[in-house]
Amino acid sequence: MEKTQSSTLNNIDIKQKGQKIGVFVCHCGSNINGVVDCKALAEESLKNPGVIFATDYKFLCSDPGQLLIKDKIEEFGLDRVVVAACSPRMHEKTFRRVCRKADLNPFLFEQANIREHCTWVHMNEKEKAHKKAGDIIAISCARAKELDILDIITVPITKNALIVGGGIAGISAALDLADMGIPVTLVESTPTIGGNMARLDKTFPTMDCSACILTPKMTDIGQHPNINLMTYSEILEVNGYIGNFDVKIKKKPRYIKEDKCNGCGDCVPVCPAITSNPFEMHMSPIKAVSIPFPQAVPQLFTIDMDSCIKCGNCEKACELEAIDLNQAPIIVEEKFGAIILSTGFKVADLTLVHPEYHYGEYLNVISHLELERMLTSFGPSEGQIIRPSDFNRPKKILFISCVGSRSQREGYKPYCCNVGCMAAMKEARLIIEHHPDTQIDISYMDVRASGKGYEEFWEKAAHEYGITYFRGRIAELYQDEITQNIVARLEDTLLNQLFEIEYDLVILVGAVDQMDDLPSIVKTLNLQQGADGWLLEAHPKLRPVDTHTGGIFVAGFVTGPKDIPATVAQAKAAASGVATLIMQGEVEIEPYYAVIDPEMCGACKKCEVTCPFGAPVLVTDKAQEGKILEINPALCTGCGTCVAECKYGAIQQNNFTSRQLFASTDRASEKIELDIPDSKWEPNILIFACNWCSYTGADLAGTSRIQYPPNARVVRMMCSGRFELSFGIQALLNGFDGVMVAGCHLGDCHYTSGNYKMERRAEYMPPILRNLGINPKRFRLEWCSASEGLRWAELNKQFVEELKILGPSSMRKRVQQIRNNINK
């Protein structure tokens, strides 16, 4: 075991609060120790007030590393622990469990992020990285001294799960949970469950009939006693917290009485209104009163009021009196212990990409989902492949892959659709099986066939089915005005040859996109989207079906493109996560809630107005015989915005008190090197970063190894709304050249409105700074999402350059003089 530890205790009064701090520096292999000297960092950390023990170790998250921490807590009677390692978002809970095992309150632990925020982003500036790592540890030690003993709140869990989205992911998760005896409400926005899988004819690579494997599960959903199926419904509002979510669901009117309709269909023949069927990709007509497809679940008709002419024929034809043309939406309110989001995907609008392909203009250029419906025996052409222009069978077909995807052009998708290559091969094989004389070419960028049996599938398509592959994008399609055949101009990059080939039919394998309602769901559930629009997982490797919001899980396409096996696997994982949570019966909530001092509260209700979650409640204070406000810990989400808004200073947030944040700020100021000539001066920056977005964005910059200047030190807060102007003012007065507050983008705040409060509060900063003789440009408010690691790096670079133009802060000399007087 490699270690460095102090041989003697520092000469301090160990009875004082936070005066027995132990520092543990992790090598993380070469991730940290390859850039900085961890042994030296451990030795240097002994200089921090209160630190009596320090050591370094290769992997502190390993079992031996955790045992080392536990043993030293017990051996030295440590009352605070600082681990300098990776991001707290990675292993904070791990090390808190270690503290608990050593009978130390887990909230007396602090993690110094010297990997993502230092060694990974300053790999080429080792000396400066070492200095920064030492500063980060010093700041963490100062904060650790001020940490308080906190007790975790335990609340009961509602034994009821909500699943949003009725595709194969939602269906699989619902059945797994229901079979375990957990009541499930499955909400689907369309009139039937099944999702995009219900549109498919066969599934690759086994070529199973999609309806044959999906329909029985759909039926099970409709008949399961533990499943409440709510189709044609949408989520309106979600409040509450893990284990206790209060949800409002809107059931849209079908204009059919669900308890009376038996699916007989007597209303259909008499309906004169005809529209196009969205389930069939609008390739076939359908009556205004309809069921999307024969196997739909539930077997309930729906009247499309946009097409209905309100003739009343259906009402007369229905003997069960199930028609209600005046039906109104119904709002259902229910409590759930956990939520799974599985809203699926849609094919991107192909009319908005590749205008040279003329989709929507040339009849014989169609999407691959339109082809999929043709291939289906109950589809618009009853399994026959036809040209839309003349309904003849095409004998020469071209598939174009990656249409609108894998491109950096504006409006296109930069990511791979993950299923396009295999879908094109499958559909090509099906066509040849129906009509062996059909010639099929596939234009591709790269064949991506990485799943089980996929490589063999595409090799068989090429060698046994005679499918020809062209590597390269199609440059242009144009139409023969007489035959309406499509001529493709293309280059095969492997042969380095240009071709111009005429086809009867062209199939576009398009990009996939998020469902239209995903942004509103994300906002309702306080989730986060990546730069590509898909939802962010809590951790892509270790927690791929969890979100940063406790109790909310994800499955399927909602986090990014994936095939059916991966979707079902995620659904089962999400169901397991929900079951694990619900079966505990109760859940522990981190005690980051705010607390009001009744002696200081003026009952102005500012916190009540500020809080979007209704946590502050006006009560009668018996001791003072007056009205004060109290905060319901179960409703408080721990943003801390009310603390910064309270004009009486009556509120503090557990684990992020003003005392703790000032301690971090002051220690960071003390680490500024003031006694250096102006020629060697570099700007010193203090950044207050919100936990959910900007701090995570900084972590992403680290995991992406994006390099940026090592000038900034970061103080983490749960929300930018927690920032008090006095934090920034004191930092600037204490010698920092610049202060930045980095929060979530407006509209994306994890706590709904914290960043808006910060934006309004920041308006007061410029006049205050001018009165103090400080240039207001030294303070910045910026927005950076969890997916914007590159933006985080750019913000750091920009601020450094701007401060270099402004020059050293005028406060530096004042602070230096104060330090000199103290030293004397």
Image: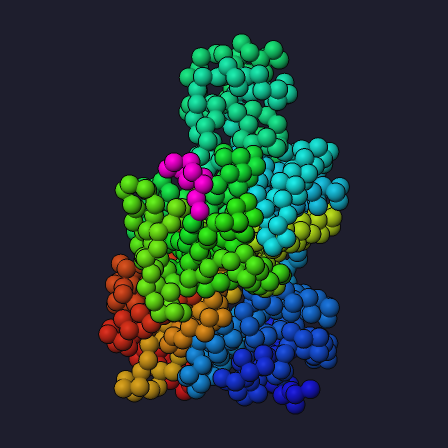
- Is residue 400 depicted above or below 175 in this figure? below
Q: Where residue 441 appears, x then y in whole percent?
A: 44, 56
- Is residue 558 depicted above or below 806 in this figure? above
Q: Is residue 796 left or right of residue 57?
A: left
Decide which of 353, 711 is in the foreground and name it. Answer: 353
For residue 784, say whether it is visible: no
The residue located at (30%, 67%) in the rendering is 778
Instruction: Please check the rendered image and state whether residue 539 is part of the magenta-colored stretch, yes or no.
Output: no
Q: Where residue 461 appears, x then y in whole percent?
A: 54, 58
- Is residue 724 depicted above or below 351 in this figure? below
Q: Is residue 688 left or right of residue 800?
A: right
Q: Which residues are magenta?
A: 386-395
For residue 425, say whether it is visible: yes
Q: Where residue 305 appears, x then y in whole percent?
A: 45, 23
Q: Quadrant location of the N terminus?
A: bottom right
- Is residue 414 depicted above or below 127 in this figure? above
Location of residue 83 by image quarter: bottom right
Q: How many marks?
A: 0
The residue located at (38%, 82%) in the rendering is 673
Q: Is residue 664 left or right of residue 216?
A: left
The residue located at (73%, 71%) in the rendering is 102
